[in-house]
Image (cartoon, rainbow, N blue to C red):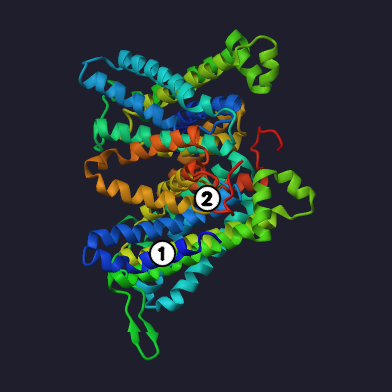
């Protein structure tokens, strides 16, 4: 527990960010989007980093979660307290239907199989115009319903600061899910599946069941991130669920350190915040990301976390072998 | 009847394009186990070279295309040496991630150099022909013809030529190939050059039919992956037959069921096939 006080400091810093930023909407937007990207990267890290399954359907689950909540709220007038659980349920059901057959595949076949499902989800969102408004997208998604607190009154989520706190709570929850998973027996099973699948199976472990549970959990997390994004940003289009969104999440994980505890967070923070300050760079941003991705995979396969000396990194860090 | 012939001609045209890209993909996968996501984007970069040679250099279609295909082959070798060769001993996930990175780079470099607007490529074969009562354009027939000839040539290369046999041997057993004196590293470069060249031919041929744009590689590469999985990864007859089959299925589906859902149709076919035969029709059992 040598990082006990560091955590407290980080937590206090995160709590005070809205006061530091003040009324600058632009900085608020960057910070909130960074948190959403951290959530996406954590979900991808669970399925790709810990279990070793390079799924490219997860961008689609982000879209399913976002669209479900947005459609329920804008077209049926449902409260967000109902639409969030429903969108979690629907994302989970979709990931079960997709994951069950696709987890029969291994290696590149799995990646390409999930890629095809990812494309199918985006195509459906684009073509099913009566439900999703097609390429025009859904506009005017309200923020989450206010939260009643005894004695204090109601907390409205229409201000940026409150959106920030709401999304921060979910991000911390995502982080604790991931760190719990890494320390739990289930996490160790997933790690051993990543390293030696046949050996794990020979120990009598049902690898398909474990993979499926991991796939569904990370998809549902992706769906929650999607729903939060939808209510924060207020509009959705089929591009929000495209495979490119997912690629960006993978890039953040790889550059931070795939399969490590801090990797997805460090990758998302660095790659979201630095480019915003380099405006002249905007056009070249994606080229730069591509070059960075290839050079990290080639020269630093453990990402930024792999560069941190062992004595400074947390004890529970899991490096990719 | 006329509609049927028209749709079949369309299907053969689409099928030739898919088969060419899928053949490149499957060769590269068979030799190096790389799912090269950026292959169609390499072709798109080549199509832009053709376009600029024709517009700025006042070249004709054929010489411009020849130069751009040569450039695509060289680009393929450079990519193999710089990106995939250093990774050959790392876990398979890294190939996939590098290919994604390459795709991002190629698409956005083309976008920065040429701009996002769609460009019209004039090949001089755009005139409408009427043969036996059905109408088509010369370019479409050209795609079918060149596609067919090139696939036949590749087949002969692999079966009869010294280098082709070396490619097949490296795909079967890399260490065995090295033992009998095959320069497998050179074969890797050769395969990458052939694959990139095939993809450049395909995109150059469909360029004048559709408009060219930096993002035009996404659909062909997704379809080529569908084809390669349908046929079995690494299988050459699988890629060719699968390409034509998918092209025909898609154009008949678009003609008789719904053109809106034509893309969805081919992906759904793949989902069904993957469910029952996860390694495709010609693939080896896992």
Contact check, label 2 and label 1, Cβ < 8 Å: no
Mark 2 and mark 1 lie on one chain; the one further toward the N terminus is 1
* Residue B157, picture quadrant: top right
The label on residue A313 is: 2
Quarter of the picture holding the C terminus of chain A: top right
Query: Measuring 59% from the left and 13% from the top, which residue is drawn there?
Result: B164
Badge 1 local density, few (<14 within 10 Å), some, or many (20+)?
few
Frontmost residue, B2 versus A242 = A242
Which subunit holds the residue at mark 2? Answer: A
Return the x and y of residue B278 as percentages of the image width and height.
65, 43
Q: How far apart are labels 2 and 1 at the CA level? A: 17 Å
How many discs appear?
Answer: 2
Residue A224 seen: no
Q: Quadrant of the N terminus of chain A?
A: bottom right
Residue placed under numbered mark 1 in the picture: A9
Q: Secondary structure at mark 1?
A: helix
């Amino acid at each position: 527990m040598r990082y006990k006080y560091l955590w407290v400091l980080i937590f206090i810093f995160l709590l005070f960010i809205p006061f530091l930023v003040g009324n600058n909407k632009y900085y608020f937007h960057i910070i909130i989007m960074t948190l959403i990207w951290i959530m996406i990267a954590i979900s991808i890290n669970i399925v790709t980093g810990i279990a070793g399954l390079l799924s490219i359907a997860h961008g689609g689950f982000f879209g399913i979660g976002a669209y479900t909540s947005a459609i329920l709220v804008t077209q049926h007038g449902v409260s967000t307290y109902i639409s969030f659980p429903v969108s979690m349920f629907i994302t989970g059901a979709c990931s079960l239907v997709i994951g069950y057959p696709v987890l029969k595949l291994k290696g590149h076949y799995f990646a390409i199989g999930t890629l095809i499902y990812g494309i199918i989800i985006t195509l459906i969102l684009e073509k099913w115009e009566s439900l999703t408004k097609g390429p025009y997208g859904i506009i005017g998604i309200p923020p989450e319903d206010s939260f009643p607190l005894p004695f204090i009154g109601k907390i409205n989520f229409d201000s940026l600061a409150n959106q920030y706190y709401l999304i921060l709570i979910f991000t911390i929850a995502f982080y604790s899910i991931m760190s719990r998973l890494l320390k739990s027996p289930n996490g160790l099973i997933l790690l051993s599946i990543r390293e030696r699948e046949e050996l794990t199976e020979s120990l009598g472990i049902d690898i398909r069941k474990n993979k499926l549970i991991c796939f569904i959990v990370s998809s549902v997390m992706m769906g929650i991130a999607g729903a939060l994004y939808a209510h924060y940003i207020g509009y959705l289009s089929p591009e929000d669920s495209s495979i490119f969104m997912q690629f960006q999440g993978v890039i953040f994980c790889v550059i931070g350190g795939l399969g490590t505890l801090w990797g997805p967070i460090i990758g998302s923070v660095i790659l979201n915040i630095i480019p915003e300050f380099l405006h002249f760079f905007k056009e070249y941003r994606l080229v730069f990301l591509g070059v960075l991705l290839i050079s990290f995979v080639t020269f630093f396969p453990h990402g930024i976390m792999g560069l941190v000396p062992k004595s400074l990194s947390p004890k529970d860090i899991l490096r990719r072998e | 009847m006329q509609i049927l012939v028209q749709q079949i001609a369309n299907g053969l045209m689409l099928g030739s394009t898919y088969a060419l890209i899928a053949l490149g993909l499957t060769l590269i996968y068979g030799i190096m186990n790389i799912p090269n996501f950026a292959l169609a984007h390499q072709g798109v970069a080549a199509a832009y070279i053709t376009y600029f040679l024709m517009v700025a250099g006042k070249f004709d279609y054929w010489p411009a295309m020849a130069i751009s295909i040569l450039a695509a082959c060289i680009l393929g070798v450079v990519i193999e040496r710089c990106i995939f060769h250093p990774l050959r001993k790392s876990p398979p996930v890294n190939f996939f991630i590098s290919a994604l990175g390459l795709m991002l780079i190629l698409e956005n470099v083309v976008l920065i150099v040429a701009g996002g607007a769609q460009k019209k490529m004039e090949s001089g074969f755009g005139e409408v022909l009427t043969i036996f009562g059905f109408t088509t354009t010369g370019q479409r027939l050209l795609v079918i013809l060149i596609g067919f000839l090139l696939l036949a040539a590749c087949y002969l290369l692999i079966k009869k030529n010294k280098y082709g046999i070396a490619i097949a041997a490296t795909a079967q057993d890399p260490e065995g190939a090295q033992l009998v004196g095959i320069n497998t590293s050179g074969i890797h470069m050769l395969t990458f050059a052939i694959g990139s060249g095939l993809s450049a031919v395909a995109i150059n041929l469909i360029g004048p039919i559709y408009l060219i744009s930096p993002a035009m590689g996404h659909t062909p590469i997704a379809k080529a992956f569908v084809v390669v999985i349908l046929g079995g990864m690494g299988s050459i007859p699988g890629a060719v037959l699968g390409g034509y089959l998918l092209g025909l299925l898609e154009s008949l589906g678009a003609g008789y069921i719904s053109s809106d859902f034509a893309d969805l149709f081919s992906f759904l076919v793949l989902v069904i096939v993957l469910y029952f035969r996860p390694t495709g029709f010609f693939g080896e059992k896992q």
